[in-house]
Image (cartoon, grey):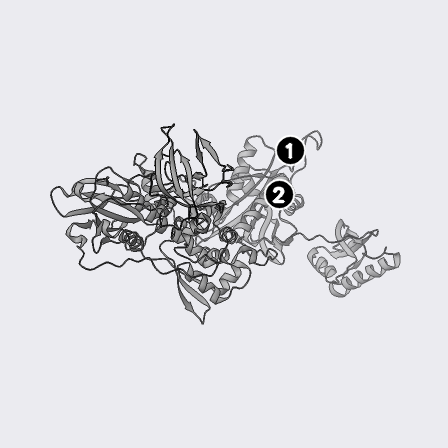
Amino acid sequence: MIISKHWLSEWIDLSEVSGETLLKTLNSIGLEVDSYKEINLPKSIVVGYIKSREKHPDADKLSVCQVDVGGETLQIVCGAKNVEAGQFVPVALIGTTMPNGLEIKKAKLRGVESSGMICSSSELGLPKINDGILPLDESIGKLKLGTSLSEFEVFRDTIIEVDVTANRGDCQNLHGIAREICTALDLSMKESHESEESENLLGIGRIASVRAEEKVNGSFLYKAFELKSGLNENLLTRMRLALIECQKTNLVERLLEYATFCTGVLFRAYDHAKLANDSEKIAFDIKNGENGECVIYCGGKNLGAAGIFQSDEARVGEDSKVILVEASYVKPDVVSKAIFENKNLPKGDQVYRSTRGSEPNLAYGADYLFKRLAGFKDGLNLFAGAQQLFLNIEPITLNISLVELKNMIGQEIARNDVVKILKKLGFEIGINVEQESFNVKVPLFRHDIINSHDICEEIVRIIGIDNIASKPLNFSEKNRLNKTYFDYKNALNLRHSAADNGFFESVHYVFDSQDELSELNFKPCKVKILNPINNELNTLRPTLANHLLSSSEKNIKNSKRSVRLFELGEVFDEDASQGLNLGFVVSGLLKEPTLINGAKGEDANFYAFASMVQNVIGKFELKPCCEISYLSPYEQAHIYQNNEKIGYIGRVDARVEAKRDLPRTYICEIDFTKLKFEPILATPYSKFQSTTRDLSLIVPENFEAGRIYECIRGLNLKELKEFLPVDIYKDAKLNGSISLSLKFTFQDMEKTLEDDDINALMDKILNELKDKLNIGIR
């Protein structure tokens, strides 16, 4: 996007703003400047008037001109084809150093003296406007002979090329750029470019009308004018069109491109005579194409798709008289989709703007264009009114609070500053004073604004990111890890731990055999399966035990002498409420026989199995029980963790083992949801030596060992690290009692314990056992 400071002055007063300030401002508000150039002509290039032109006596392509430069008349030899007497032209006087480095000196050309040079636009360092010299006119200002061109604003301009991102279609025109600069520099826009129609004009309704099918995807506005004579471009217009590299040659189309560049509204021109077909009035028909594009028809002729292409039907030519001007707007996503879906769709020069978002205010663009047309006075007639069709687009309304803005920006922005910035950018603001919030209505030309974060970005870029105080990052994102995640991670860790301890994972259906479950005394589920897979899988399983025993049986029959399995799976209670259980089974030997552990191997036993389970789930306590019918009444217990019952463990009843051809088998089932997964805390260890003592107690034969443990733990001796049973001795001399030997380990964090310290601790333990349990030493 190429802009010039002089051109922008039509919308905003930049007389007090330097080109450097303009450059910094554009960069600071997100409109990155690609190139910057200041036009500064030498003072010795002045306005001259060609009084006469004669052919060079010795050169057919040269002319000898007498040029009045105010104080004197110079003879200048010129080779341009378009030089004529009566022209005002730029003249470089003797001694001038041109922008390209050429120094002007007095010279003889084919024997004729030449004192200066009549300049072309390229020689002045401007874009090429024409072939030959550059005739001047008063569109650039009052022409006075001898006046330096550097005194004209257009010749001391600042040219800036801005890289506008694809989402900022509103800045693909000078009006949009002016709005941004006005907001950033806190300036006011100049009065509107609205045109005033004269009285007694013919109405456009006499020659054209517009019709559209329901829910057409675009807005359209049609106006008309009649050419009496050809249009004439003044120098200022030609210079500006050359600046934006306009390649069109038809003067009407060049004028429309000028208006589009200024306002952002897309224009097209049609020759009324090519559409009328002997009828004075024509009708435009707007229809949606296959992919949503707006196709314009007239009398059965396809005139093109709005924002995409214009067909050759009814294009204006040099002899066109009555011109119909079409202003259109189609949402950028509609245009982009149509182009993407139909690769064969022709693409015109308007696609670049329409896919990025053209100006939807068609009336503003049409008024600007016809105000310029009115300046031609006797050259044309304007038609009054307009034929129009508008797309009913409801603007997006967003609610944002000052607190929300503060949290996003990192510092507080005054309410008045927020309101002023947004209003200058074209937003409509409604203020809720009590709640310190705003209802922001997004203008239609800002299709890139869709949420409160976009509003925040607008405020920040105008204030300037450099003006936002730097602060350390405060990560305020909420922890999105929930119970489901932690359950998954805990289950995964348990499975890994079970595998590390020699168990193999087993996976079964959630269905089970009702007959086999009944043999294990499990109650049937009240919810019946209407269409079971087979008779062996005809009910929801209430336990993992049956499947684990069945898998153990199959492995034993396949010559496995040591079976160690685990499963983590869903179970269902009598009411079909779903739960998650963890099951373990060891059948046969603890380990497969090897050269290391012997050919026979060690049979599975309760304590070894309990130790293996404890290595997987962590420490737990066992309390004897006898109500689980399919377990041996002599080897079964409830598992407790943090004083909560979480499952059971025991040996499978011998009758069940015999029926299933199983060797000695131990099984455990735990409610996964009741397991405690507490983080492991690293605690310091003592650097002092530990000391052990053995103690043999006389205990009644049927005395519960857990009572002894609870009694000793109740002392809360910080020096007592652990105590374990090491021996049980029975003798008839003990009169129905047994000798239970315990090994105590003592260690202090601050010193090495001496014999007196150990003896004092042992006395405390013996006294407690005697007082509470009536147990003494052997």
- Which residue position holds label 1? 592
Label drawn at residue 478: none
Task: Judge whether 557 appears above or below 326 on screen.
Answer: above
Q: Secondary structure at mark 1?
A: loop
Task: Find residue 96 and report its horizontal and vertical position in percent.
Answer: 50, 41
Q: Quadrant of the N terminus?
A: top left
Q: CA distance from mark 2 to mark 1?
A: 20 Å
Task: Judge whether 279 appears above or below 384 on screen.
Answer: above
Residue drawn at (15%, 43%), measured in percent from left and top?
Answer: 276
In the rendered structure, which amino acid carries the disc numbered 1? Glu
203 left or right of 643 in image: left
Label drawn at residue 497: 2
320 or 55: nearer the viewer: 55
In the rendered image, the residue lying farthest to the left is 278
Residue drawn at (44%, 34%), measured in percent from left and top?
Answer: 113
Residue 128, by quadrant, is top left
272 left or right of 431 in image: left
Task: Find residue 448 and report its horizontal and vertical position in percent.
Answer: 41, 51
728 or 134: nearer the viewer: 134
Rate crowding at label 2 as few (under 14), some (14 to 19) or many (20 or more) other CA atoms within 10 Å. Answer: some
Q: Earlier in the sequence, mark 2 or mark 1?
A: 2
Query: Can I make out residue 355 in this image?
Result: no
Task: Find residue 148 and report its horizontal and vertical position in percent.
Answer: 45, 48
Mark 2 or mark 1, whichever is nearer to me:
2
Query: Can I make out residue 338 in this image?
Result: yes
Q: Quadrant of the C terminus?
A: bottom right
In the rendered image, the residue lying farthest to the bottom is 434
In the rendered structure, which amino acid carries the disc numbered 2? Ser
Q: Secondary structure at mark 2?
A: helix
Task: Find residue 488 and report its horizontal and vertical position in percent.
Answer: 54, 47
